[in-house]
Image (tube, rainbow, N blue to C red):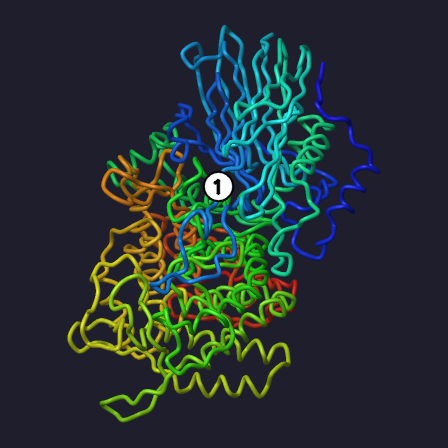
Amino acid sequence: MSFDPFDRPSRRSLLALAAATGALASLPAFTATAAPRRPDSAPEIDGAARQELWWQAPADDHSMIEQGLPVGNGRIGALASNDPGRELLLITDATMWTGGLNDSLDGDGQFPYDREHFGSLTLLARLAVDIPDHDLSTVSRYRRALDLARGVVTTSYVRSGVTYERQIFASRPDDAIVVHFTQSGGGRYTGTVTLEGTHGETTAGASSFGAAFPGGLRYGAAVSAYGSGGRVSVSGGRVSVSGSRISFTDCKDLTVVVSGGTNYAPDASHHYRNPSLDPEQLARTKVRAAASHSADTLLRSHVADYRSLFGTLDVSLGTSSETQRSLDTWERVRARALDSAPDPELEAAYLQFGRYLMISGSRGSLPMGLQGLWLDGNDPDWMGDYHTDINIQMNYWMADRAGLSQCFDALTDYCVAQLPSWTELTRTLFNDSRNRYRNSSGKIAGWTVAISTNPHGGGGWWWHPAGNAWLCNTLWEHYEYTLSRSHLEKIYPLLKGACAFWEARLLPYTLPDSGREVLIADSDWSPEQGPLDAKGITYAQELVWALFANFRTAAQELGKDTGYAKTIAGLQERLYLPQVSPKTGWLEEWMSPDNLGETTHRHLSPLIGLFPGDRIRPDGSTPSDIVDGATALLTARGMNSFGWANAWRSLCWSRLKNAEKAYQLVATNLHPSTDGSNGTAFNLFDIYEVEQGRGIFQIDANFGTPAAMIEMLLYSRPGHLELLPALPDAWADSGSITGVGVRGGFVVDLSWRDGKPTEARVRSVGGRTTTVEFAGASRSVTLKPGGSVTLKGFAR
């Protein structure tokens, strides 16, 4: 017998709901629309092709951020405990933010940075499925797994001779999280399903709730359950935070469907709200629609959608030993740290885990901040925000490289939607006398951002003048991969506005040694160290140089602003670029021969021209003293830092073609975290040690490290790609990677043996001409869009 606490929807009622919530239909979907269309067909699931991470113990309810397994559909997500007797899901929505515009400065010239004003990402709901007679102590052969190839979390165990199984997945086609319980051998399920909010909300008898934050954001969630062979019923009227319950008795199988969201809208003119949307009603409609399908249908639709992205890239880094394969994932992580032996299959799975997180956390909603889509409470460190001085950019370094260009769109849409607010805040507040970074010329134009940004158009902490250039350069690089004209047109106002900001901000400066007049950035802070008011910091100079170059190319491609592009070209030509200190031998971070900060600091701000930029190249196109100075500075920064900082270091060493150092940093990030130390948690989340004994999850290393791994195998810039530029000994015997995006509009499949390529297939996704290089020898490739060529016979 099945139970549905809502009336079955008719096609007419669904169309009416879509019309009622369609006032902002021209904007990205977010939560204000019905779920995306169900795929027409689903491919057969190939069991032999599965890539699986597995564990022999469930998560502790009090350590979900390090032990819970993540699911997500790009908008809603959850951490799952996988406990036999109590399946706990901590549910999030990318737009579930407290706070508001935050459009004022305090006495120190900072934006308020707290949960009330700036706001914080926070939990949407908790869902618990209690099965009292399935306590962990009463079961055997427990196993849980994350099937990376299908995007499904599974749990299995044996109780009283019966094998019980469950599957958890977050479906994008149905915009819901599904928990499906089955058994084989005559078993039955009896227990309760409880949905509750985490902010003191009341819950409706129909298993849903809705509420609002003081900032005006409305939110809601709903749950439905149905089963076979038993009875499912709902209890409770409108009750307290403890929630209403769905009871199930003697069910052979059970399916639980939960959804929710907010009335956030990516539109500054509507204050980032859709006032006509009732999130609770929409959540109820979504779970009602999903519950009208069988669990098998929901699964197949989810897998078809998920695999359309996950299947774009495959990677093999070599063969692990039978002993390594026999261990569960956490044992493998620990064993790798103990004996330092490479585990190439685990390392390839770690790369694919990063892709799984990207697909699960960045589609059709806001981009991922410091913790992505996953929380274990309502008070994440740094509010789980968007840090614009490395973290949000690093989150998306992997996307295009790893065949997930569609996932990048969330960042683009966010920046486009925020631009009106950022422009207005810059106009009204940047030259405020309280802002230590105001333009000393008194001029102001365009836009920039604070170090932290929220989804409501506001900033947090200090102003971050060069943040606009770094965001623009990140958006531009996506164009270099895809050659999407529509993307270029979308980001062009951002590029032009950022150039206008810097046109007003740059100052003339006469170099004392040569008497040459150059342009330098006004007072700034080299993230996040050193003097607070230094002019001409390398970080800003490099970012602005790249911004100007990118804008000029964009204007030419679109046939716009010819005169202004010439003005920007003149400014770029006069920009000061960093020198090597005669005292330290390092590339200077400030316009000073002295080191004014911490030698081993986590940030690599002065090396931004090495990576993610590539003005500094070890190929003869850059003066050797600059390359040597960058190498010396990178060496001084050290080889052991926080996860995201190690990932950045690895990428820089890869650019310098030092394979073993690049690999060593990947291995360091795979080191198990203990007692909150830096490293990889039980569930493979990266842990950032805030203080001794206390670590937090910060997702950027989970994306930055895979980006580094791919960069070690393929380097690209428009018109040039290099095979195996930093292949470490650990992967040299044999391997392959397919579906790698490269700048210039191509995709590459590459295989190698004994340290050299055996075959490289280059396919055009818009690019026409590129050179392909290995070990100093290069070949020229010319293709029509959609065409491909296979190259063989590489020699050292």
Q: Position of residue 269 (x, y in %)?
A: 64, 61
Looking at the image, how many numbered discs can be counted on the residues? 1
Q: Position of residue 96 (x, y in %)?
A: 54, 44
With 778 as the anchor, is 5 left or right in this view? right
- Label 1 element class: strand
Outermost residue on the left side: it is 583
Residue placed under numbered mark 1 in the picture: 122
With 414 as the anchor, is 699 left or right in this view? left
In this orientation, which residue lies closer to the viewer: 707 or 749? 707
With 694 as the anchor, is 94 left or right in this view? right
In this orientation, which residue lies closer to the viewer: 794 or 680? 680
Look at the image and tell me in which quarter the C terminus lies: bottom left
Above or below, comparing residue 52 to residue 701 in the picture: above
Above or below, comparing residue 502 to residue 41 in the picture: below
User: Can residue 628 be seen by looking at this rendering?
Assistant: no
User: Can residue 690 be seen by looking at this rendering?
Assistant: yes
Residue type at mark 1 is Thr
Q: Position of residue 370 (x, y in %)?
A: 42, 49
Look at the image and tell me in which quarter the N terminus lies: top right
Outermost residue on the front side: it is 107
Q: Badge 1, how many Cα within 10 Å: few under 14, some, many 20+? A: many
Outermost residue on the top side: it is 160
At 71% from the left and 41% from the top, the residue drawn is 39
Q: Position of residue 14 (x, y in %)?
A: 78, 39
Above or below, comparing residue 350 to residue 627 in the picture: above
In this orientation, which residue lies closer to the viewer: 778 or 715? 715
Outermost residue on the bottom side: it is 515
